[in-house]
Amino acid sequence: VTSACRNSRNSFSRNVLTFLVISISNQFIMLKFPSNQVRSLTHGTIFRSTAPLVQAKIGEVAPKNIKPVIGLEVHAQLNTRSKLFSQGSNHKEASPNSQLDLLDVAMPGSLPKLNLSAIRAAILTALGLNCTIQDLIHFDRKNYFYTDMPAGYQITQYNRPIALNGHIDFIVTAYNRSFITEFAHSQHYDMVKYLYYDGWKLEDEAKPYVKRSNIKQLQLEQDSAKTLHQVASDQNDLNNLVNYNRSGAGLLEIVFEPDLTTPDEASSLVRELIMILKALKTCDCELQEGSLRVDANVSIGSIDGQSIPRSDSNRVELKNLNSLRSLHRGIAFEIRRQATRIASGDKVLQESRTFDTKTGQTSVLRVKETAVDYRYVPEPSLPPLRIDKTLVEQAGHDLAKNVVLPSVIRQLLQNKYGLSLTLIAELLDEPGLAQYFMNIMDENNKDDTTFDPDTVADFLVYSVKNLKSIQNLPFKVDLDPAEQSDFVRKLNPIKMRKLLKMVFDEEISFTMAYETMKCLFTSSAESCPRQLISEFGWFQINDEEQIDQFCAQVIMNMKSISKRYKKRGETKDLRYMIDKLNELHENRINVRKAIKCLNRRLRPAESEQEISNSKGPNQA
């Protein structure tokens, strides 16, 4: 059957044969392609279903001033009950090939019928992304043959998409340092210094900044089926398993202008887009499940200030990057690979590549097609659609009334609470945490205690990251009464405020406050923070005479460090002694008073000193 499909140039025959294959089993369909090759019926080219990994040649020295050009294309699967042009269910957890409509498998005679819910979701998303809604939209056929597209074409929008000219403002932050550390200890260490090639060093924390990325267009289109590649039992062939449940689902493709210049900007942009789509509730943005898929177009604009001719630096598309980490690593490697080729006098070919998470390298999928190869034609079964103004007005009303976008929260956190961009990005990165923070701070008006916003935000970010790292504990901050998470139920903003008040009143340390949070979160029973602290004996040691005795003991036990601090007054030596005090007394020492005692004994001429960054959860 597969051979007949390959050799048949008649679309009716292909559709009938495809239906026969689908009818064989309600489970995954196994399609075996001889020699791992498929001949495209659209333009006769040969491509491999799996290509051997192409090892990129990495030179010892790379250009220092590389200016790449990066543009993203994001495919977001819309949260609708049925598919874009059929009544097939969009249920994602159904058994393979059980959610099919005739149109989803291109049965002869089946016709597309537009899903109005998808139009509404697309309009709401377009408004949330500051786009202009088109009055008149068209649907087009994008012609290509592949196993995941049974019709031999995809219904998409090419000439008249649903929306144009939007933008996203987002905070650019340095990528997770734990990734850099892990990468530095891998076999690709020579590449680490080029991850931040724009004058940044590995040990530096790049300062966050706000950037705007422009959106070219938003277009509605059908999703393809889901293909799983498996090596056959004899290890000499490849099995392609196709699940058609996803075929025909509504996709919204968001095409960004190529205005990004670093991997950090790309990953930060996608992070912001995810927050927007989740706030709009138009996509669940599960990258690992494929409901949000990112393609990155990468090329080199200039090296050492010299522009690179387009013929020498063609655009390379990285396909289906299914995590922020893969996005960052894939772009970083591709920039390095392309710059090395250009520096050695080779041309960069226009091709589609995939990123291998195991090797950290990209490999060739196929030669990149152009719009001419896809032979776009108007979809004959769908007439042009005029967008009713009432739909746009209703979406605008829903957006203003029911949706709080990340940009609004960011502005509030910056203007009302004076938080830094770093803390704002960290709060927004965890859904619900920013609102949780604001609820705690708004309680300030109900008593005489005033909390420092930076300290509270820093402590929450630190605590949440650590709680999420505890294995087998699903952590979630959700203030919605209907779906209140375990964390919020056990430690609501009022309880958290009482816990923080004990810290600011110097009854407990930040470390003990975190331990209290962990106990409350992991315990099956609900407890009062003060009662729990009393049971475990976590109250802070505040008696100055007692602290002075402890300090004298530490000075005696750490003679070399105490002498060096007495002579030079370096903060790191003071930290060593404070750390030792906390180690000996289970993090219950009042750090402020301990610093005062140590300075009085070792450097009496100086005023009371503070440890840098002592404010917040990392105190001492």
Image (spheres, rainbow, N blue to C red):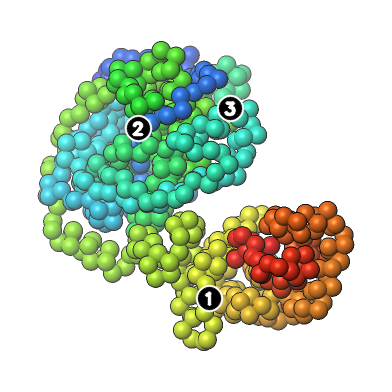
Q: Within 10 Å of the Cα at label 2, are there few (<14), some (14-19), or many (20+) other Cα atoms?
A: some
Q: Residue at x 83, y 63 (%)?
A: 554
Answer with left or right where residue 397 lies relative to residue 462. left
Q: Earlier in the sequence, mark 3 or mark 1?
A: 3
Q: Which quarter shows the N terminus? A: top left
Q: Quadrant of residue 406?
A: bottom left
Pointer 2 residue: 69
Q: Amino acid at mark 1?
A: Phe
Asked whether residue 468 appears in the rendered view, the answer is yes
Q: Kindly check if marks 3 and 2 are in contact, taking CB atoms under 8 A apart as contact.
A: no
**Residue 389 appears at what percent x and percent y?**
13, 58
What element does badge 2 sit on?
strand
Disc 1 designates what residue?
Answer: 451
Q: Is residue 614 left or right of residue 63?
A: right
Alpha carbon separation for disc pair 3 and 1: 45 Å
Q: CA distance from mark 3 to mark 2?
A: 23 Å
Q: Are marks 3 and 1 in contact (CB under 8 Å)?
A: no
Q: Splitting the image into 4 quarters, where does residue 561 fall?
A: bottom right
Q: Which residue is mark 3?
A: 190
Q: Residue at x 46, y 28 (%)?
A: 64
- For mark 3, give the secondary structure: helix
Q: Is residue 3 above or below residue 144?
A: above
- 315 lies left or right of 431: left
The residue type indicated by label 2 comes to Val
